[in-house]
Image (cartoon, rainbow, N blue to C red):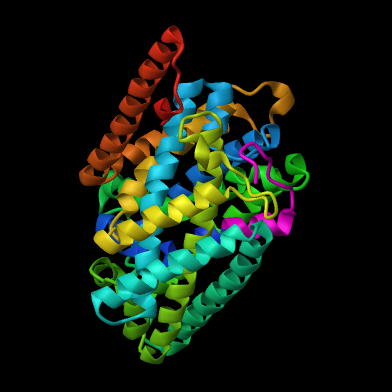
Amino acid sequence: MSASGRLERRLGTRDAVVIGLGSMIGAGVFAAFAPAARAAGTGLLIGLAIAAVIAYCNATASAQLAAAYPTSGGTYVYGRERLGDWFGFTAGWGFVVGKTASCAAMALTFSAYAVPGPEWAQRAVAVCGVIGLALLNYRGVTKTVALTRVLVAATLAALAVLVIGIIVGGNASTSQLGGWDDLIAAGPYGILQSAGLLFFAFAGYARIATMGEEVRDPRRTIPRAIPLALMIAVAVYLVVGVAVLLAAGPERIAVAAAPLTEAVEAAGVDSLAPVVRIGGALASLGALLALMAGIGRTSLAMARQRDLPSWLAAVHSRYRVPHHAELALAVVVSVVVLTVDLREVIGFSSFGVLVYYGIANASAFTQPPSDRRWPRWLNLLGAAGCLVLVATLPWQSAVAGLLMFVIGLLGRFVVLKRRGRGRKTGTDEPQDQL
């Protein structure tokens, strides 16, 4: 085992697309429509389009940067290289902390769909899911991709059955959508808030970039895989979103704990509820698997730069994965799952992800012409869009997100001060690392 080893390039374009889809077509499609409907009603469809446009700007920035810096870490690396250490740390901290919370949320969502029993049983099953996926990730990225491929295929099949069932059920009606006045009734703020919440569902293409060190021919593969995965995900979300609204309308969806289950019941096809439950469980597992892989690679990159404990930078000599980072993540997520319920962290996660992509767009804007693949105005549009969506998130999410960044930045400042004093006295100790 090596603390300074490199990961191996084993992923092709199809593998990279599968990793992205596993992250995007995850539990978000089973949960994100409810808060979006509360914010904007049928205007969530406009919010979905806005989120998709901003996601495309962010995707092109990430793809362009990943082609130039094909290593693990995603925007943590890009921010350091293009803007400076503090910007890189901000992006990496937001990603690791925000997505660790999302891991706990996905694990609990999986168990809620898989085990409709007592809370203790759901938490136990959630921990089993986390440990099982951690062990699979430990065995190498090809095992991760193989399971992700199965989970994505099963999730897409479940969603296809759901949409077809709603269409043929007989109760779906275009009257549920209303007219133009209904689409814009929530006003710009409500629509933009729904866009910020739905952006949570599209953030998964970052997994492709964070795993850039494991992609073959990254200058060609990553710029192809990221936009392709995003386009497929947008199409799926649009079809499912329209079907859900046609079946149940925005009012019922807004108050539903399980919006897709509510939709099949409203459409008169209750028999499909088990399909939704199975699809939700598998989608949650797929999202959790991709999240854990992405956090492990970002933690690896941060540990290499001593922004996290250097112990996390170890790469397994046989399986070529950041095994210390992945095992540590599994322990942290399991503890969180057993102690708190984080299934309502969509807004918190969106805050961290939007800051992350704001830094990605700023980093891409500074790239020289030789590294550019898309025009700079897309970076400006993406950065502005991220800032607008952050400002329109629910205030509780904004406060929690700001607190998360304040803690991380202050912590880094203190550690660097201690480390600087250690160098002056010749006693720079390992414990001064984050």
What is the chief secondary structure element of the magenta stretch? loop
Task: From the top left corner, tell me how far across and down residue 381 is, in percent.
Answer: 49, 33
Q: Is residue 286 left or right of residue 28?
A: right
Q: Which residues are magenta?
A: 1-20
Question: Which quadrant of the figure has residue 65?
Answer: top right
> Residue 163 placed where, x, y %?
48, 78
Residue 106 appears at what percent x and percent y?
A: 40, 62
Tell me if residue 159 is in the magenta stretch. no
Residue at x 51%, y 35% (from the top left corner): 310
Residue closest to the far top: 424
Near-viewer residue (134 or 85) = 134
Instruction: Tell me, yes or no, if residue 102 can be seen here.
Output: no
Task: Give the camera-side residue of 201 and 409.
Answer: 409
Q: Is residue 407 above or below residue 147?
A: above
Write down the quadrant of residue 258 in the picture.
bottom left
Residue at image point 44% right, 64% down: 130
Residue found at the far bottom of this picture: 271
* 26 in relation to 94, above or below: below
- Quarter in which the C terminus is drawn: top left
Nearer to me, 102 or 18:
102
| Residue located 29% across and 30% down the image | 406
Asked if residue 398 lies left or right of residue 13, the reply is left
- Closest to the observer: 246 or 195? 195
Q: Position of residue 396 (x, y in %)?
A: 21, 45
Q: Residue at x 56, y 71 (%)?
A: 151
Q: Is residue 191 above or below residue 134?
A: above
Q: Is residue 84 visible?
A: yes
How many numbered circles are shown?
0
